[in-house]
């Protein structure tokens, strides 16, 4: 089943485009040059003196790197139908995506890997993620499971994260950048909630590496054993569906020999 986005835009398309341009810190001249249109025409579009064509809205959305979900909103604001479908992950046409995701997760065993959606809700995970989730309160495992809440909540992983301040700063920083990129009110609300969670550790304002550091590690204590991980993030390279575009696969790797041996046993 394909679900098409039906958000009704109440603001003019020119106003939305100007807001995205400001958010990307791109001048009218630079955007006009990259989109191969005149600055005058772009100015007319932004001020509402000219109605952009459907192709023009899509072209500007592409050059402004507007997420697919928000490109649909731009089209609606301009009076056009949405261009990008939003398919349920269980839909028949998503079989290849499901297979690819499952293959990535299982091939990463015995190391943890999980898939989240745009709002950081857990979509799928491999069995090794249990090394993290079995530390949390069952109440936090009620669907939809939000992995950021799961990690930073005082009844979640937080008491078991040895470098909580550092890891919290890393996750909050990622979420702040996502909010800036998407202007998503759901993500904004999530950020505000996470900032209320207590943290006794110092939280650095800027991620500055210590001696020998090449990434921000996750240091986790599991059943009295100290484990250290680093993670990689994967997305689909050429998505044309909103669901596919918003899937993120985070894979955790052991950062030392002791962690690798523990996970293998």
Image (tube, helix red, strand yellow):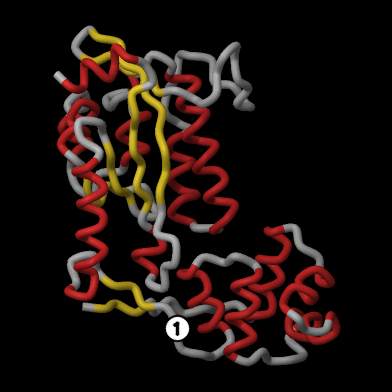
Q: Look at the image and tell me in which quarter the N terminus lies.
A: bottom left
Q: Is residue 71 left or right of residue 16?
A: left
The residue at the point 32 percent across, 49 percent down is 116
| Circle 1 Cα neighbour tier, 10 Å, few/some/many (<14 / 14–19 / ≥20) | many
**116 or 121, which lies in front?**
116
Q: Is residue 112 left or right of residue 173?
A: left
The residue at the point 85 percent across, 84 percent down is 40
The residue at the point 47 percent across, 34 percent down is 171
**192 or 257, which lies in front?**
257
Per the image, label 1 sits on a secondary structure element best described as loop
Instruction: Judge whether 11 appears above or below 19 on screen.
Output: below
Q: Is residue 52 left or right of residue 253?
A: right
Where is residue 5? Give x, y as percent: 38, 76
Where is residue 164? Give x, y as percent: 43, 19
Where is residue 41? Give x, y as percent: 80, 86
Task: Check disc 1 and report the residue beneath it.
Answer: 82
Q: Look at the image and tell me in which quarter the C terminus lies.
A: top left
Instruction: Judge whether 258 appears above or below 35 on screen.
Output: above
Where is residue 257? Give x, y as percent: 32, 14
């Amino acid at each position: 089943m394909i679900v098409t986005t039906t958000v009704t835009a109440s603001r003019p398309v020119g106003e939305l485009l100007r807001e995205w341009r400001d958010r990307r810190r791109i001048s009218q001249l630079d955007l006009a040059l990259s989109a191969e249109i005149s600055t005058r025409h772009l100015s007319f579009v932004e001020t509402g003196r000219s109605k952009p064509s459907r192709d023009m809205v899509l072209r500007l959305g592409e050059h402004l790197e507007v997420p697919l979900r928000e490109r649909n909103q731009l089209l609606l604001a301009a009076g056009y139908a949405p261009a990008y479908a939003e398919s349920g992950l269980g839909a028949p046409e998503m079989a290849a995506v499901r297979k690819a995701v499952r293959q990535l997760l299982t091939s990463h065993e015995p190391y943890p890997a999980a898939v989240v959606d745009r709002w950081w809700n857990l979509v799928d995970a491999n069995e090794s993620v249990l090394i993290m989730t079995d530390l949390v309160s069952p109440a936090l495992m009620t669907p939809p499971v939000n992995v950021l809440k799961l990690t930073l909540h005082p009844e979640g992983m937080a008491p078991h994260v040895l470098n909580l301040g550092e890891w919290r700063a890393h996750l909050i920083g990622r979420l702040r950048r996502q909010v800036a990129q998407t202007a998503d009110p759901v993500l904004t609300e999530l950020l505000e909630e996470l900032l209320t969670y207590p943290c006794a550790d110092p939280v650095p304002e800027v991620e500055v590496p210590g001696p020998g550091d090449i990434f921000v590690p996750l240091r986790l204590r599991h059943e009295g054993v100290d484990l250290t991980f680093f993670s990689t993030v994967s997305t689909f390279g050429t998505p044309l569906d909103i669901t596919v575009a918003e899937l993120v696969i985070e894979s955790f790797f052991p950062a030392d020999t002791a962690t690798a041996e523990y996970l293998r046993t």
